[in-house]
Amino acid sequence: MSQEKARIIKSHDIRIDNDYADWITEVKHRYRSSQVKAAVKVNAEKLLFNWQLGRDLVQKKAEERWGAGVVEQVSLDLKREFPNAEGFSTSNLWYMKKWYLFYTQEEEVILNQVGAELQILEKQHAAKLHQVGKELSYENLHQTGGEFPLPFVLVPWRHHVEIITKCKSIDEALFYVGKTIEQGLSRDALINCIKANLYKHQGKIVNNFTEHLPDLQSKLVQEVLKENYDFGFATVNHEIYDEAELEESLTKNVTDLLLEMGTGFAFLGRQKEILVGGRTRKIDLLFYHIRLRCYVVCELKAKPFEPEFAGKLNYYVNSVDELMKSDDDNPTIGLLVCSDMDNIDVQWSFKGISTPMGVATYNNIRIKDALPSQEQLADRVRLLQKELQETKRLMKK
């Protein structure tokens, strides 16, 4: 408030008091809000236009009907009519057609095979979509020949282009649409996610979520948890190390740990104590996931999976449910991260366990002893130089 007041430029014949300063601050806020709403509406309307134009080019069989150069002609006609408008290049029109075709490649009915995924996106981002929906006419969202997917309005056009040109399936494309909405990804960040094949590496964790969680929650949990975690930011002293050393190394770099865990994780503590039956037990790592609205119990094992690990994790998950979980929280999730595992071994270990849990692996732990000292590096450099000189001498002969 004080910053806003300091920016008031006083003109002649006016008295500036607190009421005026409060009112002008509110006016500025309303205007900024209207700018945001206008930008959202403009983006949504442009996306709807792009979808409709792509649909027209497909359904009217434009090239077959008017010739191979029809897209170039449409581009010229639109540019001539709207010389100051952007987005009417020939390549952009081809992207509009490809966008529509990508999601309607099987039959002429929009996204029948992925209706469930779209419903999940709409539920996840209901507040954002409600705001956009108020700005748009729902009559415009239900067009003959295909229903425009409302979640698409939350993703910029150039993001859509990157997704449809780099993804091989509708499921993969919708995964990145959801990630863009959820995390507010920039275009560069989206491209990096696609290059890293985030779609392949997420949701593949060995788990029992589908059996013990509601469908929507199960799908969300599988999207959040990874099948493998890159602990390349952590260093242990020796090639043979235990869980305590691994845990200490991870929590020394808690920012990197949270980045690797993913968006939404809040770190609640290491060796979190719980008191059961007069005995104190300790959970390796305890998190709360804001989006999932549940606790996540994480057990670390610096060795391959053993069946007894599942029983211990089950105990800790039940303990957190009984001692910490509130009525508003979703069921606690168990996550076991170990150096290696056999999928069948894990699946059999889950039989008879009703708590939701998954098992993942980790890699890329750095070994301090494996890194050469400065003296060793200097010796290697001298050896290489000597070998190079000898090679040059032999070549001169």
Image (tube, rainbow, N blue to C red):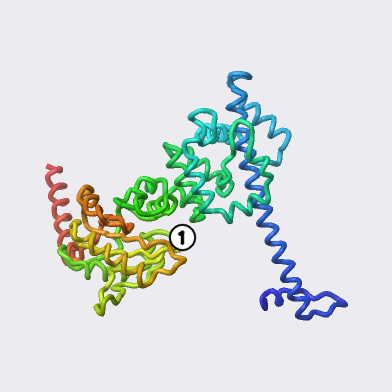
> Is 229 or 329 nearer to us in this picture?
329
Q: Residues within 10 Å of mark 1 (few under 14, many from 20)?
A: some
To which residue does mark 1 refer?
A: 291
Residue 325, percent across and down?
40, 69
Quarter that holds the N terminus: bottom right
Q: Is residue 2 above or below residue 244?
A: below
Residue 366, percent across and down?
23, 62
Quarter that holds the C terminus: top left
User: Which element carries disc 1, helix, strand or loop?
Assistant: loop
Residue 316, percent across and down?
29, 67
Q: Does residue 363 appear left or right of residue 137 in this picture?
A: left
Q: Is residue 223 above or below residue 64?
A: below
| Type of amino acid under label 1 | Arg
Q: Does residue 87 appear left or right of residue 395 in this picture?
A: right
Q: Does residue 236 appear left or right of residue 65 in this picture?
A: left
At x 36%, y 45%, the residue is 200
Residue 89, percent across and down?
61, 35
Q: How many marks?
A: 1
Q: Does residue 175 appear left or right of residue 366 in this picture?
A: right
> Is 19 or 367 nearer to us in this picture?
19
Residue 386: image quadrant is bottom left
Q: Is residue 72 above or below residue 216?
A: above
Examine the rendering and report whether any part of residue 180 can be seen.
Answer: yes
